[in-house]
Image: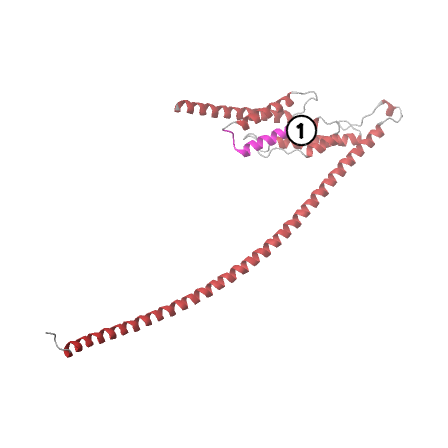
Amino acid sequence: MAPAEGAGYGREMMAASRLELNLVRLLCRCEAMAAEKRDPEEWRLEKYVGALEDMLQALKAQASKPASEVINEYSRKVDFLKGMLQAEKLTSASEKALANQFLAPGRVPTTARERVPATKTVHLQSRARYTSEMRNELLGTDSAGEPKLDVRKRTGVAGPRSGDEKQSAAELDVVLQRHQDLQEKLAEEMLGLARSLKSNTLAAQSVIKKDNQTLSHSLKMADQNLEKLKTESERLEQHTQKSVNWLLWAMLIIVCFIFISMILFIRIMPKLK
């Protein structure tokens, strides 16, 4: 019975390790695909990310799953890839850039060959790409940096481009204003936390100071009580020694008196016939 249980546990460990290995391989493949320039109609990466979520849930359900830090790192990378795909589906470059800023890439490289986590590299690349798209939308240029000329501009007829530029500038202003509001809110929260931390520190300092004073007073009183106890113990010991000496001499005197009285009584009284 015991060998069968041991074999079952070994198969379970091997299955869990194989599942984690497959997860790491697919994660590396997804990171490499995310770093490449893909066609808008590319569908494999989204399917791979869905498979990663299923494998991650299965890995969490395993009895011999990895450490919680490793599981959290896998979850962070899968969530990053999922969020990146959702950001790519947005229509405006400003919305893509804003969604990209809220993504959290992985902190640990997936493989030992990586010096920097691949998700972090993908995050930086996507940020630069979205920033370039926002600039191109604002300036009305294409990906190569050349201005987009249409037939109306060539003929001197004003087209709807000025309206697009105004709309792009308005979207950029909205994004910048949103960023500024977010930074101001974070600054206010940090300032409030700093004030709260300062007040808590001062309160703790005052409490510790009072406790130190109380402890010093208690130690001083304990030393005084100890000295008084020693003095009283010495006095009690001396008193006890004196009492024992007087009692001993009194008993000796009484015994001697009784002894002499018995001798005199025997000498004086006549013998009974």
- Above or below, 216 relative to 246: above
Residue at 72% x, 30% y is 96
Type of secondary structure dominating the magenta stretch:
helix
Find out whether residue 150 is within the magenta segment: no
Q: Quadrant of the C terminus?
A: bottom left
Instruction: Name the kind of residue labelled 1 in the image.
Output: Met
* Residue 90 at x, y percent in the picture: 73, 27
Q: Is residue 25 left or right of residue 34?
A: left
- Above or below, 104 relative to 4: below
Q: Nearer the viewer, residue 180 or 156?
A: 180
Callout 1: SS? helix
* Residue 272 at x, y percent in the picture: 12, 74
The mark total stands at 1
Q: Is residue 123 left or right of residue 168?
A: left
Q: Is residue 92 left or right of residue 161?
A: left
* Residue 246 at x, y percent in the picture: 30, 73
User: What are the residue bounds of the magenta stretch?
Assistant: 64-84
Q: Quadrant of the N terminus?
A: top left
Q: Residue lying at the far left in this picture: please name it.
A: 273
Q: Nearer the viewer, residue 204 or 13?
A: 204
Residue at 59% x, 26% y is 27
Q: Residues within 10 Å of mark 1 (few under 14, many from 20)?
A: many
Residue at 17% x, 77% y is 265
Find out whether residue 66 is within the magenta segment: yes
Q: Nearer the viewer, residue 266 or 111?
A: 266
Q: Nearer the viewer, residue 104 or 208?
A: 208
* Residue 60 at x, y percent in the picture: 55, 28
Provide the residue designation for mark 1: 84
- Above or below, 194 relative to 69: below
